């Protein structure tokens, strides 16, 4: 069953005729296709995916279970949405209240032909809370990527290497092992900088190392717990989980 179908199955329980999906993360979830612009519209009978010319070729190859339509400067997303609203007789249209701005809501209220806009972010939140088999595989894959990159970084760290250099190498190795991109800039800080949970890597040369990273695999995020590396004698390095750090003291 496609994710569009999963959304359609829940419409009745929310009292909706259709669900409008406009946020980037939820479009990615429903269509399993990444785009920075567009919208998905799921009715009880059929699903639609709207996007512009930049994504149409890739969307045709990757999206299944939905009719693709292209928005332009002359035919806007609201125009395409209204065509579906009228053809399916949609009265109650769900929207993502957790993502929509006040300006977007007011514009939809003015432009869309449905009788009622219904806040319905919970429909997608509930679906996404339970991972399907494919998502679980992606999470495992992302974890394995982070583990391999960690081992690469352990071998890379040596006296005189800077925080920025370690951060750059970590990102490079995660990409080499198959990550799509970073979820955020890796947190690689050392010494006095280590007190900053969201510190920014600098040109500081390292001694005590704190590292926090996340990578993305097929749209899913995997968080690598903090690790502390202690370049000790004989080339040995230690790394600890956050809770262990509370009880651990440097070996000096």
Image (tube, rainbow, N blue to C red):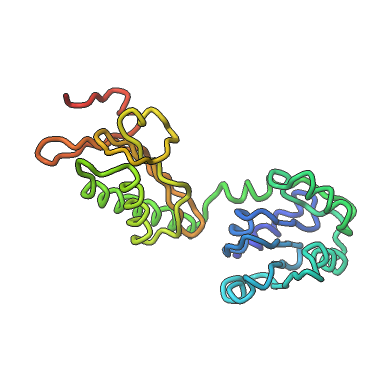
Instruction: Quarter of the image for the C terminus: give it.
Output: top left
Residue 173 picture location, percent across and down: 32, 56
Q: Residue at x 61, y 51 (%)?
A: 127
**Vertical position of residue 11 compared to residue 226: above or below:** below
Q: Residue at x 90, y 53 (%)?
A: 115
The image quarter in which residue 26 lies: bottom right
Q: Residue at x 49, y 53 (%)?
A: 220
Instruction: Quarter of the image for the N terminus: give it.
Output: bottom right
User: Is 29 on the left-hand or right-hand side of 78?
Assistant: left
Viewer-closest of 110 and 84: 110
Viewer-closest of 123 and 167: 167
Residue 51 picture location, percent across and down: 69, 67
Viewer-closest of 74 and 41: 74
The residue lying furthest to the left in this view is: 234
User: Is 94 on the left-hand or right-hand side of 222?
Assistant: right
Total marks shown come to 0
Q: Residue at x 83, y 53 (%)?
A: 108
The residue lying furthest to the front in this view is: 203
Residue 96 picture location, percent across and down: 72, 49
**Vertical position of residue 23 compared to residue 200: above or below:** below
The image quarter in which residue 22 lies: bottom right
Residue 52 picture location, percent across and down: 69, 69
């Amino acid at each position: 069953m496609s994710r569009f179908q999963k959304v359609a199955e829940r419409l009745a329980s929310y009292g909706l005729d259709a669900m409008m999906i406009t946020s980037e993360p939820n479009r990615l979830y429903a269509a399993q296709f990444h785009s920075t612009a567009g919208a998905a519209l799921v009715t009880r009978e059929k699903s639609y995916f709207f996007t512009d010319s930049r994504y149409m070729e890739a969307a045709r190859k990757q999206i299944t279970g939905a009719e693709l339509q292209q928005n332009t400067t002359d035919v806007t997303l609201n125009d395409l949405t209204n065509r579906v609203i009228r053809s399916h007789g949609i009265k109650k249209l769900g929207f993502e209240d957790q993502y929509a701005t006040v300006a977007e809501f007011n514009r939809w209220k003015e432009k869309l032909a449905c009788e009622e806009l219904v806040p319905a972010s919970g429909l997608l939140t509930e679906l996404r809370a339970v991972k399907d088999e494919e998502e679980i595989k992606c999470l495992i894959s992302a974890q394995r990527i982070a583990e391999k990159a960690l081992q690469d970084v352990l071998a890379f760290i040596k006296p005189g290497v800077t925080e920025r250099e370690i951060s750059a190498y970590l990102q490079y190795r995660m990409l080499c092992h198959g990550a799509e991109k970073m979820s955020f800039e890796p947190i690689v800080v050392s010494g006095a900088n280590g007190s900053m949970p969201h510190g920014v890597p600098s040109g500081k040369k390292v001694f005590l190392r704190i590292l926090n990273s996340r990578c993305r695999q097929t749209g899913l995020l995997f968080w690598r717990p903090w690790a502390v590396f202690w370049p000790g004698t004989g080339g040995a390095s230690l790394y600890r989980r956050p809770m262990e750090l509370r009880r651990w003291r440097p070996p000096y």
